Each structure stands twice: as structure tokens, then as C-alpha cells.
Image: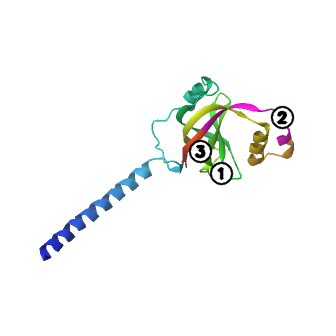
Amino acid sequence: MKKIIFIFIVVLSFTACKKENKNVDVKKETVKTEKLVSFGKKITADNFVSKDKILNTFKNLKKGDTVAVKFKTKINKSCKKKGCWMRLDLGDDQETLVRFKDYGFFVPLNAQGKEVIVNGKAYLDVVTVDQLRHYAKDEGLSEEEINKITEEEVTFAVESDGVLLVE
């Protein structure tokens, strides 16, 4: 019985040491890469496309179409009250409005200007005047600027289930 306990302790010691070495290797790898902060569903920082390809995808969408997308770009604007939406750069003076699935997560209030990898579903959306005014208020625009919004907008939209923010 003593031999069995001794063997168990020796095996346990080797296993514990091996586990510790794995953690050291992981830390070395994170130092070498950009720091990524995850929001929503856990996604990986691979297999994404450029903003140019996403813009072409949006241009080929018809009303009612939905396409799974994963792309990397810069945040032009974001909600400054809760972090509940973002407007992302698509190039060619185009943007996409990103909202988060089931209002389930938010991005930091200071996310504007940072790069993100977004995973979700792309589609064409009609944003009402009330919604546009709400977004303008969240963005911190003046009452005068908000009142200038008088027409709905057809926009490129993404319902995101996961975001990686590049720090």
C-alpha cells in the first residue's frame, strides 16, 4: 500500500511540473502577438478577410440576403453611452453599422479609432429616423445636429456574435 501511495505521489509531481511548463509557453506566445480583448462569443484571430472584400460582399447583397462574415477593420464611431454599437470603416467612404447579437455584450466606450475583428452576419438594413437620432445622441452630437436627421438610411449592417478588439 505504501508503494502505491509513493508511486501516486511521484506521478502526480511529474504531472504538476509538466502543466506548469505549458503555462510558461503560453505566456511567451502572447507577448509576441498583438493584445486582443474578446467580447461576446469567443472567436479566433484567423481566417478573416479585409475590409475591401467585405465592402464588395455588401455591394452584392440584395434585400433579405444574409452572409456570414469575419473581417478586420477600424472603428470610426461607437456608442459613447454603453458601447452597444459601432460604425466600422469599409474604405471608399463607406461604413457598416455593427450591433451585437441579442444586446448580449458591449465594447469599451473608448473603442473609437481601434482595430477590431468582427464575426457575424452581414445584411442590408433600413435604419429609421428615430434610430438614427438615437445613435446620434449616443455618439454625443448636439441637438441641432440630431434634428437635421430627417430621412431613413439604407445601410450595410452586421449583427455580431463576437468581437476581438486590438489593444
Residues at marks 2 and 1 touching, judged by CB atoms closer than 8 Å: no
Mark 2 / mark 1, whichever is N-terminal: 1
Which residues, given as a range, are shown in magenta?
A: 145-158
Pick whichever, 14 or 39, lies toward us: 39
N-term mark: 3 or 1: 3
Q: Nearer the viewer, mark 2 or mark 3?
A: 3
Q: Residue at x 77, y 43 (%)?
A: 136
Residue position marked by numbered label 1 in the rendering: 110
Amino acid under disc 2: Thr
Q: Position of residue 154 (x, y in %)?
A: 71, 30
Question: Where is mark 3, residue-wise?
Answer: 101
- Give the Cα separation between the discs numbered 2 and 3: 27 Å
Say which amino acid is labelled 3: Lys
Residue visible at 16% across and 69% down in the picture:
7
- Asked if residue 69 is positioned above or below residue 9 in the image, the reply reads above
Residue under label 2, please give it.
Answer: 150
Number of callouts: 3
Q: List x then y, in percent, for residue 73.
A: 58, 37
